[in-house]
């Protein structure tokens, strides 16, 4: 993950330099003629297990400081200690080892507040809040003597091998740097909490995710 952090830092330097260069011309702040934006994003995820993600976001400026947005994407392994413990119970009974993961497709909508009073005119900070749905897929592999255990030997419950839709809450903030009139770079940190669904999985627990999000977008 240190490599990912270095890449994120380099990306921020690049977009800040691009913003500084564009600041030599009239400001690229979008006006009423360009209320929409769209972006592609990617980056690392952090937590009990770290992986990566990719996604996209579109938004619309409803007033001077406020955007509404929708976003969606896919996160790699965001497994938890609870998932590992559940898988290890079966692995111990078979005298093997367990490898368990959660893969998440997410979609949420919300609001984004843009701060305009900053010491750096080319950097536009914001805070965001969203609510949506996460499709969580649990994948578990038990290995005994180097060979994966097949379904003929053990049958997993939906908590270890199955897909469930759960509520997703997202909170975060970042900076937006415009360049070349309509384009922008974006760096943000987004926390997501996927709520447990005990109706489908007994004693289910929540999943906490953190995304370090890098993005390139356009206003239109």
Image (cartoon, rainbow, N blue to C red):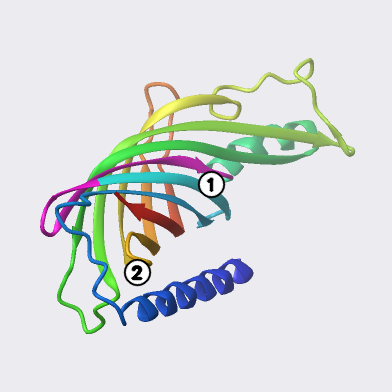
Identify the residue under disc 1.
Answer: 78
Which region of the structure is painted magenta? 60-76
Quarter of the picture holding the N terminus: bottom right
Looking at the image, which residue is at 38% across and 31% down? 166
Asked whether 156 or 207 is in front, the reply is 207
* Residue marked by disc 2: 177
Residue 202 shown left or right of residue 128 in the figure: right
Tell how many labels: 2
Residue at the front extreme of this rendering: 25
Is residue 131 one of those drawn in magenta?
no
On screen, 209 above or below 158? below
Label 1 secondary element:
loop
Does residue 187 appear to the left or right of 37 in the view shown?
Answer: right
Residue 168: which numbered mark, if any?
A: none
Q: Quadrant of residue 199?
A: top left
- x, y (%) of residue 99? 70, 41
Q: Residues within 10 Å of mark 1 (few under 14, many from 20)?
A: many
Tag 1 and tag 2, C-beta contact below 8 Å: no
Q: Main secondary structure of the magenta part?
A: strand
């Amino acid at each position: 993950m240190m490599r990912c952090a270095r890449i994120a830092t380099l990306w921020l330097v690049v977009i800040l330099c691009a913003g500084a260069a564009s600041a030599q011309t009239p400001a690229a702040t979008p006006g009423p003629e360009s209320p929409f934006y769209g972006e592609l994003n990617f980056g690392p995820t952090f937590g009990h297990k770290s992986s990566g993600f990719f996604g996209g976001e579109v938004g619309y400026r409803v007033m001077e400081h406020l955007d509404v947005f929708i976003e969606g994407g896919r996160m790699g392994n965001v497994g938890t200690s609870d998932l590992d413990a559940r898988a290890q119970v079966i692995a111990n009974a078979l005298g093997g080892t367990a490898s368990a993961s959660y893969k998440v497709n997410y979609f949420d909508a919300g609001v984004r507040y843009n701060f305009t009073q900053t010491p750096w005119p080319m950097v536009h900070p914001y805070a965001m809040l969203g609510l949506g749905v996460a499709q969580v897929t649990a994948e578990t592999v038990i290995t005994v003597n180097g060979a994966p255990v097949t379904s003929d030997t053990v049958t997993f419950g939906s908590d270890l091998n199955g897909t469930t839709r759960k509520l997703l809450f997202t909170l975060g903030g970042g900076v937006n740097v415009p360049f070349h009139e309509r384009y922008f770079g974006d760096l943000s940190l987004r926390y997501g909490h996927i709520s447990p669904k005990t109706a489908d999985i007994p004693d289910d627990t929540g999943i906490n995710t953190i995304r370090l999000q890098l993005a390139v977008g356009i206003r239109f």
